[in-house]
Image (cartoon, helix red, strand yellow):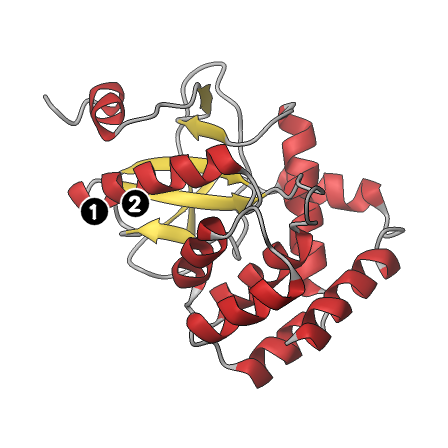
Amino acid sequence: SRAIIAMTQMKKTLLIFLPAIAIIAIAIFIRVVQFQNGSNDRADINTQQGALTIPILADDPIIGNKKAPITIIAFEDLGCSHCAEVDQTFSELTAAYPKQVKIIWKSLTVTRFPHDARPAHTLSFCANRQRKFEEFKSLAFANYQQLTPFVLEQIINDADLNTPKLERCAGTEEPELYLKKNEAIARSLGIQAVPAIFVDGQQVQSLSTVQEWEQFLGLLN
C-alpha cells in the first residue's frame, strides 16, 4: 500500500545516521559463502589468487538451485534499464542450466530519477522474506521507469504478497540495514555502476547473451 511505501521513505531518513563504520566492519568481516544442502549453513567459497572476497548476506536472494556449483554474484538496481536486460539473460541462463548456475542477487539502489528506486528495493527485501522475490523483481524490472507509489502498490498485488506481513516487515529497520550493508560492500569493492557482476571473486564485464555466458562459464565443453 502507499502507506508502506511512505513508511520506508521515512525510515531511510531516520537511519541515515547509523554508524557507517560498524556497517563497513560487518561487510569486511563477513566471509564469502555459499548455501549447501538447501539451508542457511555457510561455507567459504575458494577464490582465485588475487580475487576479491565478496560478503554474501543471509538475506541476499538466490535465483536458481542453491546447490548449483557455478555462482554469479550480481549487484543490481530495480530502476536500471541495463540491469533489467541482464536480469532477462540471467533468467534464460538459469532456466537452461538449472543444476549448474545460480545467481546471488544483491540490492544496490542508485536510481533517483525519474523515480527513487529505494522503496522498491525495500519492498523486494520483504518480498524475499515471503519467498516472492523473483515475482516482485520481474514485475519491478518490467516497470523500471515508473516505480511510483501507485505502480509499486500494483506490483504488490500482482506478486500476490501478503500485505499485513509486508507492512510488518517494512515497518522494521531490517530492510534499510540490509540495503546499507550492500552499499558498504559495494564501496569496499570499488563498484561505481550497476549492474556489477562477479564470478569467482573477479568482476566480469557485462555479457549480453546466454551464448556469451555459456562460453565464458565453460558450459559448452
Residue 176 lies, with reference to residue 78, above or below; the image says: below
Residue 150 picture location, percent across and down? 62, 67
The answer to whether residue 65 is visible is yes
Residue position marked by numbered label 1 in the rendering: 95
- Residue located at (49% from left, 14% from top): 50
Secondary-structure class at tag 2: helix
Q: Nearer the viewer, residue 69 or 171?
A: 171
- Residue located at (34% from left, 41% from top): 88
State left or right for residue 23 relative to residue 100: right
CA gap between label 1 and label 2 equals 6 Å
Question: How busy is the neighbourhood of tag 1: few (under 14 within 10 Å), some, or many (20 plus)?
Answer: few
Residue 195 lies, with reference to residue 147, above or below; the image says: above
Quarter where residue 90 is shown? top left
At label 2, the amino acid type is Ser
Residue 58 picture location, percent across and down? 52, 55
- Residue located at (48% from left, 75% from top): 157
Residue position marked by numbered label 2 in the rendering: 91
Quarter where residue 213 is shown? top left
State left or right for residue 164 relative to residue 188: left
Question: Seen from this angle, which residue lies furthest left?
Answer: 221
In the picture, the quarter occupied by the N terminus is bottom right
Residue 153 picture location, percent across and down? 58, 71
Mark identifier at residue 205: none
The answer to whether residue 97 is visible is no
At label 1, the amino acid type is Ala
Question: Could you tell me if the residues under marks 1 and 2 are in contact, i.e. CB atoms within 8 Å?
Answer: yes
Q: Nearer the viewer, residue 2 or 33?
A: 2
Residue 129 picture location, percent across and down? 50, 69
In the picture, the quarter occupied by the C terminus is top left
Secondary-structure class at tag 1: helix
State left or right for residue 44 relative to residue 184: left
